Amino acid sequence: MKIYSVSDERFAPYGKIIEGYDFSQLLDKLEETTEKPSDRVDYFPSLPALEALPVFEKVRDQVYGGMPIQFGCCNGTNTMLNCLEYHRDSEVNIMADDAILLVAREDEIKGGKLDTSCVKAFLVPKGTAVEVYATTLHYAPCSAKKGEGFRVIIVLPRGTNTEKPAIAPVNLEDKMLFARNKWLLAHPSASEIQKGAYAGLTGENIDISAEI
């Protein structure tokens, strides 16, 4: 699979680079207070140590226009696609390390399924912040170099990826709801299936290990 730069025009349907903000203090705090596992990926929706920094209010009031948000992180080592998710709002990723995003578009879901041949890969360099649009399917980042992990700050509306609301599904999309503001399509081989995730990915479960 070809890995494009996030600066490539091919990224435009999926998101954009956020410019003009100084995230250095935020990234330093992330490295000071969180681990980078070598054998898994850890996700934390909200980290008070990050949200206490002045840049939190700037991102809340300017990037999200005053909406309540949370600063969390996704840290670890990964080369697999496994799942794709989307939210009703944009997600901002701020890279403390080089990382690769595997993405597709919501309108490529056909009949409740998405073929993984639609997925594209983009390298996002350390220190870069990107907005991932609400219509972009995405999941845990991938390592940019074999054997190396990543730390990525994940900015989302407050409450996203927390406890799933109790619902009685009335349509197919309702069956994809996996957590609060999180619709998830899992590959049949992914461990998320055992946790009740909707099997919505067809084709190969992409592994980029041969490309890095």
Image (cartoon, rainbow, N blue to C red):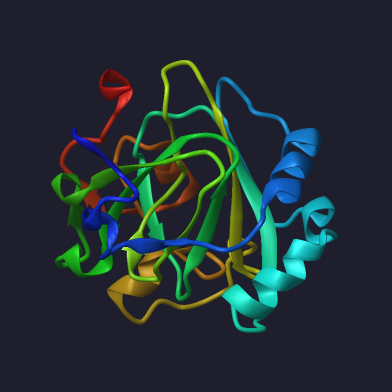
Which residue extends farthest front? 20
Residue lying at 31% horizontally and 35% vertically, measured from the top left: 189
Q: Eyeballing the image, is 4 above or below 131? A: above
Question: For this view, does 181 lie left or right of residue 203?
Answer: right
Q: Is residue 179 left or right of residue 66?
A: left
Residue 134 point in image, percent of width and height: 40, 71
Horizontally, residue 68 falls left or right of residue 179, namely: right
The image quarter containing residue 99 is top left
Kindly identify the residue that appears in the image at 44 percent across and 43 percent down: 192
Q: Quadrant of the N terminus?
A: top left
Rendered view: 53 above or below 126: below
Q: Is residue 128 left or right of residue 190?
A: right
Provide residue 159's location: percent of width, then percent of height.
66, 69
- Where 147 falls versus 182 (above or below)? above
Q: Is residue 2 visible?
A: yes
> What is the count of numbered marks?
0
Judge whether residue 44 can be spotted in this image: no
Q: Residue 97 appears in which quarter of the rendering? A: top right
Taking 60 as reference, is 150 above or below it? Answer: above
Counting from the top left corner in percent of width and height, residue 65 is at 61, 83
> Looking at this view, is 168 or 90 the one in front?
90
Picture coordinates of residue 158 (x, y %)?
67, 71
Residue depicted at 26% across the width and 23% down the height: 211
Quarter of the image containing the C terminus? top left
Task: Name the foreground residue: 6 vs 39.
Answer: 6
